[in-house]
Amino acid sequence: MITISNNTLTISLHTPDSVNGYYRGTRFDHAGVFESIICHGCNYCEPWFESYSPLMHDAVCGPAEEFSPIGLEGTKAGDPFLKIGVGILERLDNEPYDRFRLHRILDEGERLTETGNNYVRFTHRIASEIGYGYDYVKEIAITSDCGFTIRHSLRNTGRKTLEGDVYNHNFFTLGLLQTSPSRTIDFPFHPEGDWRAEYSEVGFTVSGIRFSRVLQKGESVFTGNLHQSGRGLTGSPNAFILSEEQTGRRVQMHCKIPMTKTVFWSNHRIACIEPYIDFKIKPGESLDFDIDYSLR
């Protein structure tokens, strides 16, 4: 466990460890798995799941990032493919890729961790025989009394192009209250999208998402293509504000790279905004981006 702090903000993070690590699944990036984000005495990312296993696909808290699989085309059961932040994985069978299934890690690469008073820097290197390689640096740094930034630098060191998408699941709990009309989500644009069902308990407003009642255990809501009204799935501003009116707690997020879409998912414990960024990194090129968070 690594802890960084200032006078008002304390962030604790798990270190990647394929043997004893807190999270050893094959869905999310193993670097920068949050244990807690405590600001003014409130923990903004507590465990929201009912049960825990280090191999569960979603047993993570706080900002959790997932890269899409790379190199699956033309492969069959037993063949290798790449999952950035995890390593070289083995294809389970000839069925379509399922992020919720556990895959065998064939090559976890090389990992380094560097710490300072107000930052943690994780480096992950892959150099594989299938032509994919990268140097990936992910840094979590406290940038203000109640703010932190996740900095990313992904350099393609292989002979094949890295192409796919990455998103952040934003598992913020804001004190772990039950999801209700006091949980609000706002965007710097008029959102629209297609709900998975005809929900009566949630809907879009001119500036965000609102709940009309308390969500009960076992209930969930979902939309997979939230975007700026009239714009389509390209170039929507990559920002949101998640608030809990009962406590006055708030998380504000901003990234300079526009999102291609946002997925929104909520159950009775948590409401997650998941902005997606597309990338295409040719050999020798890099992708660099920051995600800034401000807490209240």
Image (cartoon, rainbow, N blue to C red):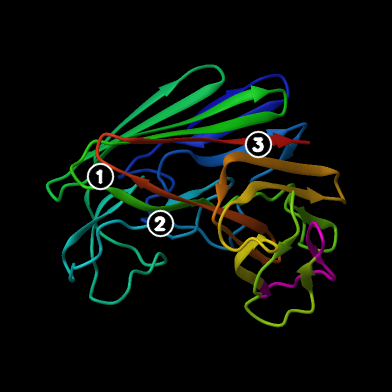
Q: Residues within 10 Å of mark 3 (few under 14, many from 20)?
A: many
Could you tell me which quadrant the C terminus lies in? top right
Q: Is residue 170 magenta?
A: no
Q: Which mark is residue 27?
A: 2
Looking at marks 3 and 1 on the same chain, the residue that comes earlier in the sequence is marked by 1
Q: Residues within 10 Å of mark 2 (few under 14, many from 20)?
A: many
Comparing labels 2 and 3, the label whose residue is closer to the camera = 3
The residue carrying mark 3 is 293
Question: At label 1, which amino acid type do we have?
Answer: Glu
Label 1 packing within 10 angstroms: few (<14), some (14-19), many (20+): some
Q: Under tag 1, what secondary structure?
A: loop
The quarter holding residue 179 reads bottom right
Per the model, the C-alpha gap separating discs 2 and 3 is 23 Å
Disc 2 residue type (three-letter): Arg
Amino acid type at circle 3 is Tyr
Position of residue 103 measured from the top left corner of the image (x, y, whole percent): 29, 62
Residue 208: image location, x then y, percent: 77, 58
Instruction: Give the residue pinned by disc 1.
Output: 108
Q: Residue at x 26, y 34 (%)?
A: 284
| Number of the front mark, 3 or 1 | 3
Res. 17 in view: yes
Q: Position of residue 178 (x, y in %)?
A: 77, 61
Q: Is residue 212 magenta?
A: yes
* Near-viewer residue (187 or 25): 187
Q: Is residue 197 above or below residue 263?
A: below
Q: Judge whether residue 46 can be spotted in this image.
A: no
